[in-house]
Image (cartoon, helix red, strand yellow):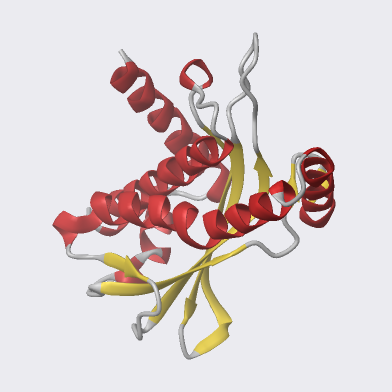
Amino acid sequence: MVRIKQTLLILILFLCFVKTSHAQKTDEQKLQEIQFLKGQSEINIIFTYDSLMVGEKTEDDYIKEKVEGKNSKNEGKGDYWLQKWNEDKQVLFPKQFIDQFNNKLKKKGLKAVPQSKSFYTLIVKSTRIEPGFVSVVNKPAAVDFEFRFIETDNPEKTILKLKIINVAGDALYTEYNVSARIQECYNIAGKLLGKYINEYLFR
């Protein structure tokens, strides 16, 4: 049952992704604009969180509230939370995305590799993170993404820009752990972008 619900969720999000990223574009246009990746076996990948919103707050305000609140109850706990928050952004969130992105494209011979010297770079920008919560009524985490493909040695040249909003986990099976909830969003986003490239590049 869980697997069926997750599959349906990803399908719905994929359809929304296509609609959001390419409003009023034909399949032929979508196919043509992704062709720059044809023949590539590897792309560089970078994750950024510039101007990130967390819920309705800026990330700075969110961090300040969390650190001060936790430290006031238990000295040092807020500082530890901040360390884990930054580690999640640099390690766990990207890992979830990359693993699923590469899994979707491994049969096609294309993969994303951090710090690769490949010709193209994919910049994954998180613009909003909703941490969600677990209570009587659960609220899953959700993340808004922008994807930008550039030439690695010419970063000002954007080849293709896509976006998808509100990539959310499954509310029914929401984790109590905030990090785990958010990781699920990156997991799903990696699948979505991999599926999109598979759909329009390898027809």
- Give the residue furthest to the front: 75
**Quarter location, residue 131:** top right
Kindly identify the residue that appears in the image at 14 percent across and 55 percent down: 107
- Give the residue furthest to the left: 107
The percent position of residue 184, horizontal first and vertical second, equals: 46, 38
The percent position of residue 202, horizontal first and vertical second, equals: 23, 57
Position above or below: 61 against 90: above
Residue in the foreground of this view, choosing between 188 and 22: 188
Residue in the foreground of this view, choosing between 198 and 203: 198
Q: Is residue 10 left or right of residue 4?
A: right
Position above or below: 64 against 73: below
Position above or below: 191 against 50: above
Q: Number of marks in the image?
A: 0
Residue in the foreground of this view, choosing between 64 and 102: 64
Quarter holding the N terminus is top left
- Give the residue furthest to the bottom: 153
Q: In this view, does 85 lie to the left or right of 192?
A: right
Residue in the foreground of this view, choosing between 170 and 191: 170
The percent position of residue 201, horizontal first and vertical second, equals: 29, 59
Q: Is residue 89 left or right of residue 72?
A: left
Kindly identify the residue that appears in the image at 57 percent across and 44 percent down: 20
Q: In this view, does 36 lie to the left or right of 15?
A: left
**Quarter location, residue 179:** top right
Kindly identify the residue that appears in the image at 35 percent across and 86 percent down: 117
The percent position of residue 124, horizontal first and vertical second, equals: 53, 62
- In the rendered image, is residue 24 in sight? no
- In the rendered image, is residue 37 in sight? yes
Kindly identify the residue that appears in the image at 61 percent across and 20 percent down: 134
**Quarter location, residue 168:** top right
